[in-house]
Amino acid sequence: MIPASFEYRRAGSVEEALGWLAEDPDSTKLLAGGHSLLPLMKLRLATPGVLVDVGRIPGLNYVRDDGDHVAIGALTRHRDLEVSDVARGHVPLLAHVAGQVGDPQVRHRGTIGGSLAHGDPASDLPAAVLALDGTMVVDGPRGRREVQAADFFRGFLETALAPDEMLTEVRVHKAPAGWGFQKFNRRAQDWAIVGVAAVVNGDARVALVNMGPTTLRARATEEALDAGANIADAAARAAEGLDPPSDLNGSAEYRRHLATVLVRRALEEATAARG
Ligand SMILES: Cc1cc2nc3c(=O)[nH]c(=O)nc-3n(C[C@H](O)[C@H](O)[C@H](O)COP(=O)(O)OP(=O)(O)OC[C@H]3O[C@@H](n4cnc5c(N)ncnc54)[C@H](O)[C@@H]3O)c2cc1C
């Protein structure tokens, strides 16, 4: 498993990375932790001509209390998020989910920016950010823009990022109470067969891992809760309208059933945590 040849460049700043991206956006890729991109390159499912290593750009690894929200730099490693006092205090869902990603080696290398930009429906952090109604801060040649998580995940490995843009920060509202996370897998370090991130603070937001081509909200469940249904009845509708994948870990039908069970558990957890 040897990747196709490529040119390697190490960026010292966001501006430098964006400049190199702009030269040939379609055949240039940013490299952060490399834990999603390098496996794809080894399988030759990705064959970028230029790899721009952003992993050592200073000042993009932080978890900051910004008043009504928490700001997380795109190069923040999963492990740093997991143990951050700011995250644990103000968005414990995010700190908890970061601690559930892969194994310690993956958590010490992988970044939140890479996880969100990759757009893998099987990833855990995108569901947490979607449930928290987060905002992505994106820099590019046309300046800076903000994209709501609800508009960010577009399809399989597809996000709202243009090929010449870089995700630089993620912002999430403080949500200390009322959260639940369920990840069902066979071994502790595995990817989720199905996962659920739920936030219940007034209204309820329920996001699903591995239940379709991208990270999704369980809209039927949310609508049922809005209409006054109890948790069990609302959770029974978790897979409505969704088309989950079938693979070696489980059939689509199995995933649909799992989603109803895990959504119920996540909502019960969130409701109990809210008190
Ligand atoms: C063995 C193993 C187990 C894993 N288990 C899990 C798991 O259980 N749950 C889970 O959620 N994930 C899991 N992962 C994935 C892991 O979390 C990755 O680290 C993460 O998905 C990608 O982050 P990265 O920093 O490594 O990104 P990279 O691999 O460096 O990049 C991924 C993609 O995002 C792009 N990119 C990276 N940073 C940016 C940026 N700032 N702006 C724009 N584009 C960018 C790259 O160009 C590339 O296309 C696992 C990975 C491995 C290898």
Image (cartoon, grey):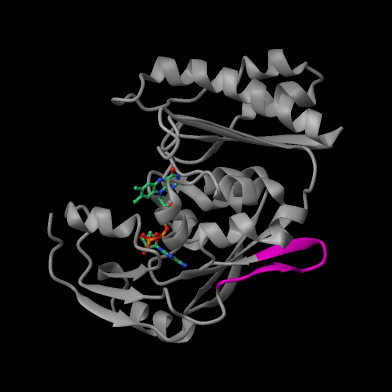
Residue shown at 24% from the left, 78% from the top: 8
On the image, the x and y values in percent for residue 7 come to 20, 78
Q: Is residue 138 magenta?
A: no
Ligand 1 image position (quadrant)? bottom left
Quadrant housing residue 205: top right
Quadrant housing residue 162: bottom left
> Start and end of the magenta stretch?
61-71
Residue shown at 55% from the left, 75% from the top: 60
On the image, the x and y values in percent for residue 67 come to 82, 66
Using the rendered image of the protein, determine whether residue 42 is visible from the camera's viewpoint. yes
Quadrant housing residue 193: top left
On the image, the x and y values in percent for residue 257 come to 50, 15
On the image, the x and y values in percent for residue 143 come to 55, 78
Residue shown at 83% from the left, 35% from the top: 274
Seen as rendered, the residue at the extreme right is: 275
Q: Does the magenta stretch include residue 67?
A: yes
Classify residue 53 as left or right of residue 81. left
Classify residue 238 as left or right of residue 7. right
Quadrant location of the C terminus in the rendered image: top right
Residue 202, above or below 272: below
Q: Number of marks in the image?
A: 0
